[in-house]
Image: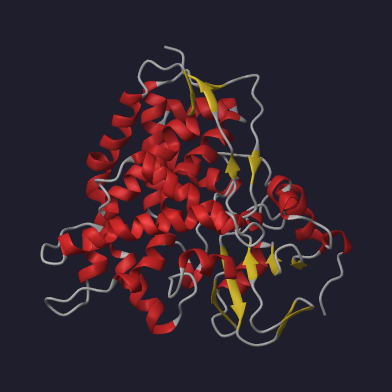
Amino acid sequence: MAVDVAWLDNMTLAELETDADRIFSRLRKEAPIAWIPALNAWIATTWRHCHEIAEDAEHFRGGTSPGHDRVFGQPNVLSAEGQTHGELRRVIDPPLRPRAFKSTLDTTVRAAVRARLDELAGRTHIDLLADYFEPVSVRCVADRFGFTHISTDRLQRWFHSLSHAAARGLVDPEAYKGGDAAAAEIREVVEDMVERLRGRPDESGISHWLHDGMPDGEVRGIEHMLPSLLIILLGGLQEPGHACGSTFLGLTTRPEQLGRVMANPALLPKAVAEGLRWLSPLFSGASRVPNRDIELSGVRLRQGDTVWLCYGSANHDEAEFGRPEIYDLDRPAHGHLAFGIGRHACSGSAFAPQIARIALEELFARHPRIRLEPDHEIIVRGWMFRGATELPVRMPR
């Protein structure tokens, strides 16, 4: 029997966007699995329930919402299971494994980071998110997949358009237009890449997608790979940059800890991990679908329902973390769920933190006196994709 939480009945998507911390804190206490009419879906908000559902392959299959299916298409790596899921992961994962990208970190990735900082040289006031973190993120991830010829501005536009369509499409069909336009552009670019790589494979992610496991002379069709590629481009282009933003913003709330990280860059991996826990970019970026009616913690889930796993909320579960609302570099070691868990965990969970580490390391080395604009309110929003809307900073010379 569903929990009766009357205050949810009239809640709007706008409230979820702007007041997620308060809403999800209340849900964790009152209704850890709750029906949200505005989403036409269930939401799981605690560490235990997110773990339990994500790892239960018997009762739950991978899922996307109807809105996601509208944006990305099928089959895609988020909802596929069995052989199809295995085949997709076998071509998606290899370029994103540490042994595959480790040699590029201090060459390709660091070079891209330094190049962006060079472009910003002389500027003393920037939006750190839009002017640095996002451009570095999209550049490094796109280059890894072979989109070296696509401009950074265009890559940012792609991920913003796909993100807006995925988060808003069900309540605002106009939002799909930008996502459709981005998907059409990406298809055109990939079609050109397929023709070039068909007989001349290289080490790019797209080349691996085309050739790995295929008979000699054959490549995978674009229809098979494009839906998952759109998902990879959305999450992959976004998450490293927003991991940087979460970490930087968190450190600014603890000036002493920021000073320690600047003085000792070896602390950056821990700082980034805490940033991802404290303000998870993919706050509710995963869902599951019951493959039969099932009761869980007194709630009856129906076959075919969408259940959003709110990993960002689980990362603030008071049963797991002491004072979870506080960014704390000295927090006792504890894993986080920013990249999900189980068979549908994010493929970029190793690569994204490395991009964030290098981006912050180079930023702090070049601008040790960087600070937020003191009179500017930082607004954090989003229930699906969550982060600061902007990070205006001063970079004294």
Q: Nearer the viewer, residue 140 or 187?
A: 187
Q: Residue at x 65, y 62 (%)?
A: 47
The residue at 57%/79% (across/down) is: 56
Q: Is residue 310 left or right of residue 69?
A: right
Relative depth, front residue between 200 and 53: 200
Task: Give the x, y percent position of residue 385.
Answer: 57, 51
Residue furthest bottom in the image: 292
Which quarter of the rendered picture does the N terminus lie within? bottom right
Residue 33, compared with residue 305, is above or below; it is above
Q: How is the image coloured?
A: secondary structure
Q: Where 389 sits versus 17, above or below?
A: above
Residue reaching furthest top? 397
In-image side of 81 versus 98 (left or right): right
Q: Quadrant of the C terminus?
A: top left
- Image point (72%, 50%), residue name: 14
Q: Position of residue 3 (x, y in %)?
A: 83, 71
Query: Which quadrant would residue 122 be assigned to in this image?
Result: top left
Residue 188, quarter of picture: bottom left
Using the image, determine if residue 372 lies above or below residue 287.
above
Q: Position of residue 120 (x, y in %)?
A: 37, 23
